[in-house]
């Protein structure tokens, strides 16, 4: 499961960095309002992904501690953030990794 978690993180970091870089280009072009918006979007994405990663780690700890209902709730909360940022295909990756993890 860690492999899929790392893959999501890499994608989200790359996406946030790309959005940030678009902000840099807009700033260099003198499009300050646009640059500001891109910077805000990149920052928001980084914060949301950080929260999702923490929820994911909390869920893993809860699962390992036998608190499966609480773990499931935290996995779903993390998944909701990942889907918002990375799209619906994220759910398929998570279910695949969870099914192999739970076997």
Image: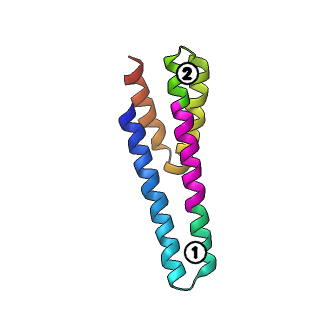
Q: Which residue is mark 1?
A: 35
Q: Secondary structure at mark 1?
A: helix
Residue found at x 58% / y 16% = 67
Range of magenta residues: 42-57
SS at mark 2 in the image: helix
Residue sitting at x 57%, y 75%: 35
Q: Which mark is residue 62?
A: 2
Give coordinates of residue 103: x percent, y percent: 38, 16
Residues at circles 2 and 1 in contact by the CB criterion of under 8 Å: no
The secondary structure that most of the magenta stretch takes on is helix
Identify the image's colour scheme: rainbow, by chain, secondary structure or one colour.
rainbow
Work out whether 45 lies above or below 67. below
**Place of residue 82 in the rendered image (x, y in percent of width and height, measured from the top left):** 52, 44
Task: State the residue at coordinates (58%, 51%).
Answer: 47
Magenta stretch holds residue 45: yes
Instruction: Work out whether 94 lies above or below 64.
Output: below
Q: Residues within 10 Å of mark 1 (few under 14, many from 20)?
A: many
- Examine the rendered structure and indicate whether residue 71 appears above or below residue 15: above
**In this figure, what is the number of numbered marks?**
2
Relative placement, left or right, of 30 versus 101 is right
Q: Which residue: 58% across, 32% down?
A: 76
Residue placed farthest to the right in the image? 33
The mark that comes first in sequence, 2 or 1, is 1
């Amino acid at each position: 499961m860690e492999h899929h978690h790392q893959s999501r993180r890499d994608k989200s970091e790359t996406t946030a960095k790309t959005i940030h870089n678009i902000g840099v280009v807009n700033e260099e072009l003198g499009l300050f309002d646009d640059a500001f918006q891109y910077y805000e979007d990149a920052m928001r994405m980084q914060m949301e992904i950080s929260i999702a990663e923490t929820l994911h780690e909390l869920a893993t700890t809860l699962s390992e501690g036998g608190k499966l209902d609480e773990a499931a709730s935290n996995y779903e909360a993390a998944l909701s953030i990942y889907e918002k940022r990375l799209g619906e295909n994220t759910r398929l990756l998570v279910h695949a990794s969870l099914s192999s993890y739970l076997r």
